[in-house]
Amino acid sequence: MDSLLLAVPGAVVATGADAGVAAHYGRPAQEQRELAAGRAIVDLSSRGVLRLAGPDRLTWLDSLTSQRLVDLRPGDSAETLLLDPSGRIEHAIELVDDGAAAWLIVEAASVLPLVTFLNRMRFWKEVEIEDRTADVAVLGALFDLDEPGPDGPPLVWHDPWATGAIGGVTRAASPHHPGADLPLRLALVPRAALAGLAGRPLAGVDALEALRIAAWRPRAAREIDARSIPHELDWLRSAVHLDKGCYRGQETVAKVHNLGRPPRRLVQLDLDGSDAVLPAPGAPVLAGDAEVGAVTSSARHHEDGPIALAVVKRSVAEDAVLTVRTPDGDVAAAQRVVVPAGAGPAVEVPRLPRLGAVQRH
């Protein structure tokens, strides 16, 4: 569904997961600076919006997903993941509760499969599930939005990535996590109200993508694939509560956190900016001649130049010089470590002697 804000002069339509909103409005770098300074709004109305009403909504979602949701009060926000039985990520959900219903913000491609799954798992729970994407839109900003909500007062989701969520943990080694520079707010507004925002300072979705990449913030439409587990993307920081009760995929979450290491890790790549090449998602990442991972997101940052997120094998040395293969040639890339290669288990388990082993003193 195309946004009403595409009628703004200069709007250039985004493609892929963001199709239907503006990639930019003709001034990409300036829009990014305005967004970072807390002066611009991003149209994210390509995202899906679900409304879950009923007295069982929070306890039911809590039993299915990775975050503790039973304690949410009206106006509280959370991020949670729906995992498969093996602990791989199927859906990332941004949730804000208004006291009568839980509002879920998801990627557009997640709407149908997520609604199908939730309806299948409802059984006798008192929960009503509505797809409200057609009449409710999402706006993003780095300041508190005061737009009217779909059912009255403003309903705004506050991204826990900026601070980390209670019950979560970050694997990032950086003393200053760049997520602190991305205090993202998502407001739910009537879709018909978008036309009235044409006179406000606007930034395209490309601006938010650049700031998101610089903040190491994973996004479901970009960073996850069929093998992704939360630990690889540092998603235990904001979307997983390590002390909550049983949910689908919890065994893998607990086992890798307490006893193991994820097989892959997220890195930020600072790309050689001497060429105009910006690698597309899926572009191979090489260490020497060996393919060790793939780009998941890329953008031109208004200060850092061309940057990307990539998922690489955990065994790749943190100081390895990498290259990204593109149709126009290889691009040199320097790593910024997000999830350290040596991030180990939270619990040290002593090794037991082998049966029959000879003890020498």
Image: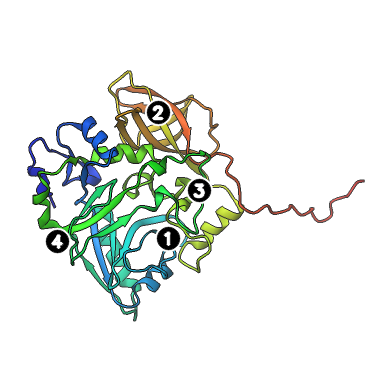
* Label 2 sits on residue: 270
For marks 2 and 1, the one nearer the N-term is 1
Amino acid type of the residue tagged 3 in the rendering: Thr
* Label 1 sits on residue: 84
Question: How far from the left and from the top, in percent, is residue 94?
Answer: 33, 57
- In the rendered structure, the answer to whether residue 344 lies left or right of residue 182 reads right
SS state under label 4: loop
SS state under label 3: loop
For marks 4 and 3, the one nearer the N-term is 4
Amino acid type of the residue tagged 1 in the rendering: Asp
SS state under label 2: strand
How far apart are the alpha carbons under marks 4 and 2? 40 Å
Numbered label attached to residue 170:
3
SS state under label 1: loop
Residue at the limit of the structure toward the bottom, as seen here? 124
Q: Mark yes or no: residue 251 visible.
A: yes
Amino acid type of the residue tagged 4 in the rendering: Asp
Looking at the picture, tell me which residue is in the foreground, 248 or 212: 212
For marks 2 and 3, the one nearer the N-term is 3
| 149 versus 195 height, above or below | below
Q: Depth-wise, is mark 2 or mark 1 nearer the camera?
A: 2
How far apart are the alpha carbons under marks 2 and 3? 22 Å
How far apart are the alpha carbons under marks 4 and 1? 30 Å
For marks 3 and 1, the one nearer the N-term is 1
Question: How far from the left and from the top, in percent, is residue 336?
Answer: 46, 32
Q: Residues within 10 Å of mark 3 (few under 14, many from 20)?
A: some
What residue lies at 48% left-to-right and 39% top-to-bottom? 176
Q: Are the two marked residues, 4 and 2, in contact with CB atoms closer than 8 angstroms? A: no
How far apart are the alpha carbons under marks 3 and 1? 22 Å
Residue at the limit of the structure toward the right, as seen here? 361
* Label 4 sits on residue: 135
